[in-house]
Amino acid sequence: MTTSSGAVARSRPRHRTWQRLVGGAGFALGLPVVLLLVWGIWASFAVSPFFPSPLVIGDAFVSTWVGPSFLQDVLPSLARLAVGAALSILLGVVLGTVIGLVRWLGDLLEPLLEFLRAIPPPVLIPIVAVLLGPTDAMKITVIVAGSLWPVLLNTIDGVRATDAVMTETARSFSLTRTERLRYLVLPAASPRIMTGVRQALSIALILMVISEMFFSSSGLGYRIVYFQRNYLIDQMWGGIVLLGLIGVLLAVVFSLVERRVLRWYHGTKEVARA
Amino acid sequence: MQPSALAPAAVARASTPAPSSSSSPRRGRGRRRAARRAGLGALGIVLFVGVWQLVPTAGLLDGRYFPPPTAVLPRLATDLGDLEFWRNIRRTMSTWAIGLVVATSAATVLATVIGLVPFLRSATHTTVEFLRPIPSVALIPLCVLVFGIQPQAALVIIVFASFWQVFVQVLYGVADVDSVARDTARSFGLGRWSRVRHLVLPTALPYLMTGVRLAAAVALILAITAEMFIGNPGLGRALIFAQSAGDYPQVYALVIATGLLGLGVNLVFRLVERRALSWHQSVRGEEVP
């Protein structure tokens, strides 16, 4: 079977690539299209108030989010998300590098950090809300308080796991402290740091939504809860779809950045595997 | 998405010995080092509590809204003697456990089947990549509408969030089966079922354990979040009640309680992971220089 198809491929290569392209697109889009169709058909037969058909949701999505409310609700939310995520990555990497390099500091803080990380971040919302009020600062604080930990702990682990021989080599070539950081420690820790950043981003998105759902009067989370409380089901679904799209977009951007930052790492791993 | 970047790292983190596990025969120097670490760690916690005490005492933050540990810790001790507190913990933990079991079993079965059939794997790829990043809390309003303030609403959110953790890990694990081992199993005439039983599942087990550990933490976060914002009974709702009553020492006591709960879950699952993978770690130890 395989040999005969191989022979066909050799005689008509063009036909084969065309087929593969169509097949790939079919695989990529087949299931989503089928699922949407099933949902649409099901929604039009069994009329449930809570599950409108995809067409209705699409309509509501466009009419709700395309226009001024994008500037009013979506952009501020995204800005808070960006500031919060950037702050937690920066703080996590800087503090993590220091804690990872200074042994006694690590020993001093480890149990405390393990505990602080284990606190479910949403329980901090009532606390921060009463201290800072329903401000942007409160939402950003909540985002940082939740998404700092994965970056911080992964950075500590990554910095500690720096190859001992390389550290000795760098020392005997008398690299300065900054040079060692720049060319040895940070690159060595970067795979772990990126793992932490990936987790931090999804936590940051979740906390952005929750912190806006409560103690807030603007933003994406607020709008979705508003729609739900007023039984604007189609618009609420539109909001859920928008959040999903933001999540997907974040994941795509992250994997692009990761591939760039860790290109050398994946390269060495492939060499090691071969 | 680079699967290999996450999974081995997560396994590796679990394999690093915890500070408490000094039971292995070591020399006095190692034991002294462990004692030093434990002492410094305790000192760190004491320092933290000290700073916490100083901030409201020195008037940096309002003591009514930021109560010092002298107000919070006695409150926590009172809670520990309160039956309602333990009932709330039971409510939270049973929602957590049901959600985790449902998500883990569904994800393991689905991911094994999908991972073993190449057609299914490529057909579901885009759907999975689109559904997975959806923040589960976005579903809270929908669940409130459909289920009201019943535990089912919380369960849907917990299952949705923790399902993907396990699913993705098991999918990587099933894809990680050594091709030589697979061919060997096939040429020794192992049937489909025994191949799954003796080859695929052991290969995927470390990934599964990592996934379950991550899922357990996520499920606890969402169980408490759901109680806070949907209002089904549990620790999260008690926290919101205490906050609306202006009882801030109780709010902080409950935050500490949730933190301890999370810490317990993490420790237990790390222990289970190390137990279940003891065979695997030894193999790794030989292979990796």
Image: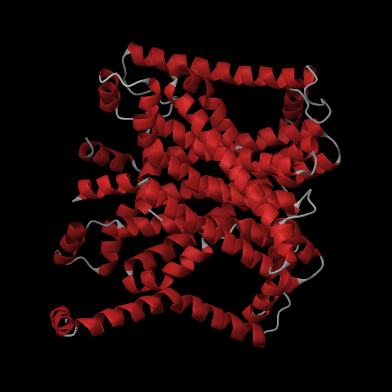
Q: In the image, residue A32 lies at what x, y percent?
A: 50, 75
Q: Is residue B30 above or below residue A126?
A: above
Residue at 55 percent of width and 51 percent of height: A202
- In the visual, does B32 lie left or right of A4? right
**Residue B283 found in image quarter:** top left
**Where the N terminus of chain B falls, by quadrant?**
bottom left
Q: Is residue B164 above or below residue A93?
A: below
Residue at 72 percent of width and 45 percent of height: B236
**Residue A134 found in image quarter:** top right
Farthest residue, direction bottom: A45
- In the visual, does A42 lie left or right of A258? right
User: Depth check: B5 or B227 in front?
Assistant: B5
Q: Is residue B141 above or below residue A274?
A: below
Q: In the image, residue B143 lies at what x, y percent?
A: 69, 64
Q: In the image, residue B67 lies at what x, y percent?
A: 78, 26
User: Depth check: B179 or A158 in front?
Assistant: A158
Q: How is the image coloured?
A: secondary structure
Residue at 42 percent of width and 49 percent of height: A258
Q: How many marks?
A: 0
**Where the C terminus of chain B falls, by quadrant?**
top left
User: Depth check: A271 or B87 in front?
Assistant: A271
Q: Is residue B105 above or below residue B47?
A: below
Task: Note whether residue B278 is visible.
Answer: yes
Q: In the image, residue B182 lies at what x, y percent?
A: 21, 61
User: Depth check: A6 or B70 in front?
Assistant: A6
Task: Note whether residue A207 is visible.
Answer: no
- In the visual, does A180 lie left or right of B85? left
Farthest residue, direction right: B245
